[in-house]
Image (cartoon, helix red, strand yellow):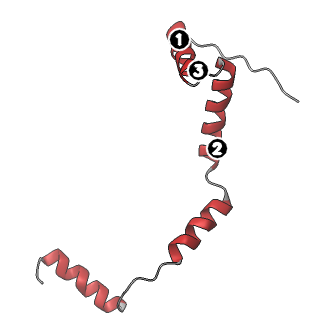
Amino acid sequence: MTKRLQVLVDDSELKEIQRAARRHRQSVAEWVRGALRTVRLAEAGRPTADKLQALHRATAHSFPTGSIDEMLADIERGYSGTP
């Protein structure tokens, strides 16, 4: 079921919205629904499956590394500027 939503905007804001809708070759209603959907999804965060997929891709790589002591020593040498 769909519901009507009324939003009041000033003239200049409406003109900007109309221009944006025209650029996207959409009606104002389509453009507003899309904009609201985009914001709603962004605030909800990425779906768990997307996060797990990113984690899987990141852990699939194998890079050379050393022990934690070696890595910390390398970092300290970088801070001090000594080779």
Is mark 3 in CB contact (under 8 Å) with mark 1? Answer: no
Q: Which residue is mark 2?
A: 41
Q: Using the image, tell me which numbered label, if any, was put on residue 28.
A: none
Query: In the drawing, does residue 11 fall left or right of residue 77?
Result: right
For marks 1 and 2, the one nearer the N-term is 1
Percent of width and height locating residue 53: 61, 66
Q: Residue at x 67, y 17 (%)?
A: 7
Q: Helix, strand, or loop for circle 2?
A: helix
Observer-nearest of 20 and 72? 20
Q: Helix, strand, or loop for circle 3?
A: helix
Q: Residue at x 67, y 62 (%)?
A: 49
Q: Which quadrant of the rendered structure holds the N terminus?
A: top right
Q: Which residue is mark 1?
A: 15
For marks 3 and 2, the one nearer the N-term is 3
Q: Residue at x 35, y 90 (%)?
A: 66
Q: Helix, strand, or loop for circle 1?
A: helix
Q: Using the image, tell me which numbered label, if any, was put on residue 21.
A: 3
Which quarter of the figure has residue 10?
Answer: top right
Percent of width and height locating residue 12: 50, 10
